[in-house]
Image (tube, helix red, strand yellow):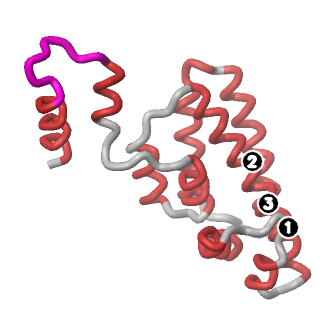
Amino acid sequence: KNLRNELKKIDCFIGNKKKIDINDLIKLTNLSENHSINKIVDMSLAKDTKQSLRALNENIFSADDIIIIIRSYLIKSKRLLKLTTELERNKNIDQVISASKPPIFWKDKDVVKKQLKIWNKESTIALIQNINEVELQLKKNAGSSLNILQNFIIEQSLKPNT
């Protein structure tokens, strides 16, 4: 059904033209929605494998996007480490989220709460070390960086924390 819809879009766009530009084709067929980088990272950290896979499959990433995604992963993981450390002292998740500096946007509170229930301080430290290793691999292997990143994201969304 999706493929038929995409083909209809292309057919309507072409009209009487004999050629279609690759950029037009990419814009037309960018599937159902273009997920934000933050959403991809948040879904993976929340261990939402289905949403992580969907977001990965429905996006076309550039080389710049790959670095932005891994850096976003690192930033969100460091925030998660700070929150898990605070959660060890103060056992109330809602208070930890509310007292967070910088403040967590109201739309993100539910996903952060879910992440805090999944991750602990030790597993978050291991994640940050893993992210640093993956970033190094991405920079060394530019040709296969998309595969490395996708494998990492899928692995993180599937892997249970110990």
Residue extending furthest toward the left: 16
Q: Amino acid at mark 2?
A: Leu
Residue 142 visible: yes
Task: Work out whether 100 lies above or below 56.
Answer: below
- Where residue 79 is drawn, which disc sits there? 3
Q: Position of residue 71 (x, y in %)?
A: 72, 41
- Where residue 74 is drawn, which disc sits there? 2
- Where residue 15 is drawn, which disc sits there? none
Task: Work out whether 156 lies above or below 27.
Answer: below
Task: Work out whether 144 lies above or below 131.
Answer: above
Q: Residues within 10 Å of mark 2 (few under 14, many from 20)?
A: many
Q: CA–CA distance between discs 3 and 2?
A: 9 Å
Label 2 sits on a secondary structure element that is helix
Q: Could you tell which of marks 3 and 2 lies nearer the N-terminus?
A: 2
Q: Amino acid at mark 3?
A: Arg
Q: Residues within 10 Å of mark 1 (few under 14, many from 20)?
A: few
Instruction: Please check the rendered image and state whether residue 20 is part of the magenta-colored stretch, yes or no.
Output: yes
Check the picture and name the quadrant holding the C terminus: bottom right
